[in-house]
Amino acid sequence: MGKNKYYRFLGQIIYIVFLAWVAWYFYNLLSSNWLTILENLKYVNYYLLTLSTLIFIIFIYTTGYLWGTLVNRLQTNFSPWQACLIDNIAQIGKYFPGKIWSYIGRWYIGRDYGLTKKSVLISIVNEFVLYIIAGLIVSLPALLPFIHNITIKIFYIILCIIGIIFYQSFFSLLTKIYKKFKKIDLKIPRLSHQTSIKYLIAYIVLWSVGGSSFYLTALSFHLSHWGVIHFINYNALFAVSYLVSYIVLFAPGGIGIREIIQNTYLPIIGITGYQSAVLAIFGRIISTLGDIIVYFTSSILLKKYKRLKE
């Protein structure tokens, strides 16, 4: 067994053990409250729960469309909507070990529609940096309660500001790294400051759309109240839990990672015990259901789009 295969195998074993612990942890929270949970399901606001699912679907489509606009800047003849549908289909790959399949899938599917490997690579780099910086900004209210040292809080805020100001410098560094390891003279074009700020605002709004879905899920279970502060808290929690699960490559779909983060933070805003577990689990159900719906609808739409082009 090669060294890389050994590390991948070891990573999967650790993740399986982690998942077993997460399952045991949630089972302990829920097992003594099954009757109460079943009784409370009668009082769930299913209109809000349905709206939460629809908004999460909008979140997925908007994510794909923003990536499509980044592709369109490189291939002006390539429709952002077509790229959006390709991205939506490829994202099902994040549920496979390694998560790399959601990235490779964009090129693998897109090549049949004229999407180049260079456009995919450059647009993904742009997307990744924008996604992370915007997510860090939105997640600020969720992270600060855990940071008791005022110096670290200030450092975190400065880090976000530096990310915005020196956004373009990421691409020079990534270009150098790519040249060194791939021996290919690929220049990753940098967005202008004005365009960078527009995209950052768009991605911050995108995170807020996803956070709205999570907030409505809490409201549907009567675990929160209407209000700006409540929305900001749930929006921040959504962002930080997704960010960590997005970065942790060994966790397919961030399963287990996202739920533990949410269950850790929810008691800070007053949701404790089995209620926090129920909310985290239903958040997962809605996101998975949304991914499945988007996958099938995008597959149908992309085929229709191809027929129209022909």
Image (tube, rainbow, N blue to C red):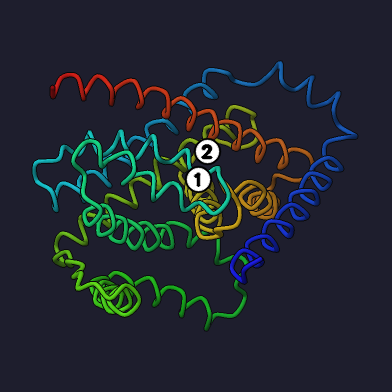
Looking at the rendered structure, the secondary structure element under dot 2 is: helix
Gap between marks 2 and 1 measured at Cα: 24 Å
In depth, the one of 290 and 303 nearer the eye is 303
Location of residue 268 in the rendering, given as x and y in whole percent from the top left corner:
67, 55
In which quadrant of the rendered view does residue 132 lie? bottom left
The numbered dot on residue 94 is 1
Residue that extends furthest to the bottom in the rendered view of this protein: 151
Q: Residue at x 55, y 31 (%)?
A: 286
Task: Mark 2 and mark 1 in contact? Answer it, CB < 8 Å.
Answer: no
Location of residue 90 in the rendering, given as x and y in whole percent from the top left corner:
40, 40
**For residue 191, side relative to residue 88 (left or right):** left
Residue that extends furthest to the left in the rendered view of this protein: 77
**For residue 126, side relative to residue 234 (left or right):** left
Looking at the rendered structure, the secondary structure element under dot 1 is: helix
Q: Quadrant of the N terminus?
A: bottom right
Location of residue 147 in the rendering, given as x and y in whole percent from the top left corner:
60, 72
Mark 2 neighbour class, 10 Å CA radius: few under 14, some 14 to 19, many 20 or more: many
Q: What amino acid is at disc 1? A: Lys
The numbered dot on residue 215 is 2
In which quadrant of the rendered view does residue 277 lie? top right
Q: Residue at x 69, y 49 (%)?
A: 263
Q: Quadrant of the C terminus?
A: top left
Specify which label sits upstream in the sequence, 2 or 1.
Answer: 1
Q: Residue at x 42, y 73 (%)?
A: 157
In which quadrant of the rendered view does residue 68 lie? top left
Q: Residue at x 48, y 62 (%)?
A: 140
In depth, the one of 307 and 56 nearer the eye is 307
**For residue 33, side relative to residue 215 (left or right):** right
Residue that extends furthest to the front in the rendered view of this protein: 1
